[in-house]
Image: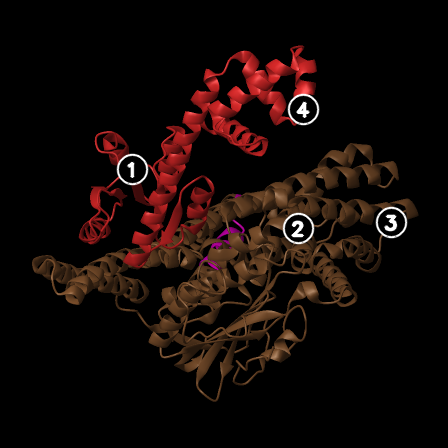
Chain colours: A red, B brown
Amino acid sequence: MNPGLTVAVIDDDEAVLDSLRMMLGRYDFKVHSFTSAEDYLANRDRESACCVVCDVRLPDMSGLELQAELQKRKSAVPVVLITGHGDINMAVSAVKAGAHDFLEKPFSPDRLIETIKAAVDKAHNRLAEDRELQRLASRVNELSDRQKQVMDLAVKGLSNKEIAQNLQISPRTVETYRAWVMEKTGARNIAELVRLAMRLQDAEHRLSPPS
Amino acid sequence: MERQETGGGLGVDEMKSSGVAFAESPANRRLDMQSQPLWIVGPAYVVAYVAMVWLSLAFASTPFGIVPWGPETGLSFMAFFVLGKRIWPFMVVAVAAADLIVRGHDFPLAAQIFAPIIIGGGYAIALTTLANPMWRFDPALHTFRDVQLLEVTAIVSSILIALGYAALLVVTGILPRAEAGPAVFEFATADLIGISVIAPFLLLLHAAGGVPRPTLENLMQAASILAALVLAFGFASLPHFRLFNVVFFPIIWIALRHGLQGTTWGLLFTQIGLIAALSTLGDQAGNLAAFQGLMLVLAFTGLAIGGLVTERRRVEQQLRLNQESGAEIFRLGSAGELATAIAHEINQPLTAIANYTRLIQQYLEDGKGDRTMAIEAASKVAAQVGRTDAVVKSFRDLVKRGRPQIKPESVHEVFRETLGLISPTLQREGVDVTVSIERGIRRVMIDKLQIEQVLINLISNAVEAMAANTSGEKHLSLRAQNMAATGEVEITVSDSGPGFPSDFDIRRPALFASVKEEGLGVGLSFSRTIAESHGGELIIGGGVDGAVVSLRLRAAPGASS
């Protein structure tokens, strides 16, 4: 049903943990269960999960702190928080901080499964998009400096003639460079090129290595 | 919103319609003095002040109106806290009136004008300073620290004012410069002793709401003070001054046994006896000032011991309340925390049950799958149901807390102890409180600790509800009355908060969706359970201008408390 999906479940309540392990296992998830966030962090590299289901209230490191830690480590794994009564404010701030969703205990098992799937899908899409952008970025990087300058100006809406004047090269050369740019990026027209350039810019912010 | 009827004999509307407190009623032992109009209480205070000066002068009089004790200053201290700051102009007027009417000084005009300003105004400034929230002074003298604050204020203000008064008398030529030193000492001692003996006595009498009925032990204590005084002054051949020290024994006995309130009675009794003895013996007695100095030491010692004993008892009581109430429950308004804890405790097994059930359902639906796993899941469901049951049971045990010890208890005492425990919260939140107990209120058949917990919980709820209206007045009233028809006593807690929502139903306290975010329903539901376990009931009512909760309890057979 859900082949290959590995889920990490973190809860300090043995009964909740055991029931989730059994139930999710029955739905063909591969489940790794942990009783603390620290335990998960220590073992997550060995067998990485597609999704983390984590109780908000945990001894020592809370679900919220785990979420922040994963963010800090630039982890793309989506986090679904589950919460007992009274932790809603905490869960809301976790979602604002980037957790995928939160469910209030007691939740229906179906709802949890749907949420996990949605989280994994979203993470997949995000990953695919990131990969595509990375490909695009590396292709743009293959362009010469002059060609990149032509691309920047073209994206700003300048005509070939204006670009030629700006860079003090012949309009003819500009035309050739521009054709190269379209070829490398795969953009079919100037509008598409603008869109690609914008996405690249966004991605640069997001994917820049942690400082 | 329609107002719900809550009272049997007395409609709640009647009480709330007065705006601030209840409607005045002869049944109220203590009226809310702060809300009485100034033109009544001001002159009343002046009359009482003049009367006290007259009384003290009737015993012993010396030149310049200096008497060895100044009970009227103690009265002013009490009046300031009971009637409110607004009384201060009357403090000047009272001194002037006493000078004119009783003392009949033929002082120059300047002295007649400035003496009341120095004395009345001086104490008004001292008391305003003491009442500054910075000091967190509680006029009901709840802690030893309050007693100390009162004494320090008395010492500093009486010395400064005595200096000012003596200077005035010297400047106006009434008092020879050479006599100024001893005069300052006598002024200050007289006022200080008046404050130390009278002020705590009156403040505690007001806080207690009445005169307690004396026990056999009280009578023995009074007798022993009398015996000590007779020993000291009754035999011409014995040294009076040294033997007066014997009075320390009964005072310390009283302080250790009855705390601050008893001590104030003992000191008053001793002081009156001392003055009677001194005025009877006249010059034979010896130096008046020296006796008053000793009396002052006696007062300070007694108040210190009494204050410590009272504070220690209060702490013990609070500890007992916390320990006996099981664990976290009811620790001053913690019903909300409790609701969260219970919700969390129950939601864990419920989550597990939902998951296991899903497994079983799936096995039953498609007929295949793992039968062993389904059986395992079913047994685990049973275990989790047991766990939920245990949570609910322990929750109920917390409320029951073993066997309640139901016996006749005094409503006065229940109120006093409850307010003693919660007064820090009330002060912090700036809530003013009116207490009204019907004269001749009957004793109630209760487990005192449980009912005090209920009252603390109700008061905490009221305080929390009122916390929202920051602009408006925060008023809480506690009232007790006999209900002759049913043989019950009704205790009513009403507040000036927003009241209960119209659809609030105490019979179905919505555990996790209540008026307050944190679960008022639980606290009220506890309170109701306790009330019903006492054979009484808890009724909620009131309108948009405040909530009213009435607790009806069985009255003890026999006379009133």
Residue drawn at 42 percent across, 47 percent down: A91
Q: Kindly report which numbered mark, 1 or 4, lies closer to the viewer in this rendering.
A: 4
Q: Nearer the viewer, residue B294 or A47?
A: A47
Q: Mark 4 lies on which chain?
A: A
Q: Kindly report which numbered mark, 3 or 2, lies closer to the viewer in this rendering.
A: 3
Q: Which of B264 and B520 is in front in this view?
A: B520
Q: What stretch is highlighted in magenta?
A: B224-241
Outermost residue on the right side: it is: B109
Secondary element at tag 4: loop
Residue drawn at 59 percent across, 73 percent down: B29
Residue drawn at 39 percent across, 40 percent down: A125
Q: Residue A159 carries which label?
A: 4
Q: In the image, is residue B235 part of the stretch drawn in magenta?
A: yes
- Disc 4 versus disc 2: distance between alpha carbons? 105 Å
Q: Mark 3 points at which residue?
A: B112
Q: Position of residue B283 (x, y in %)?
A: 65, 49
Q: Which amino acid does label 3 sit on?
A: Gln
Q: In the image, is residue B430 part of the stretch drawn in magenta?
A: no
- Disc 1 versus disc 3: distance between alpha carbons? 81 Å
Classify 10 Å Cα crowding around label 3: few (below 14), some (14-19), many (20 and above): some
Q: Name the residue under label 2.
A: B69
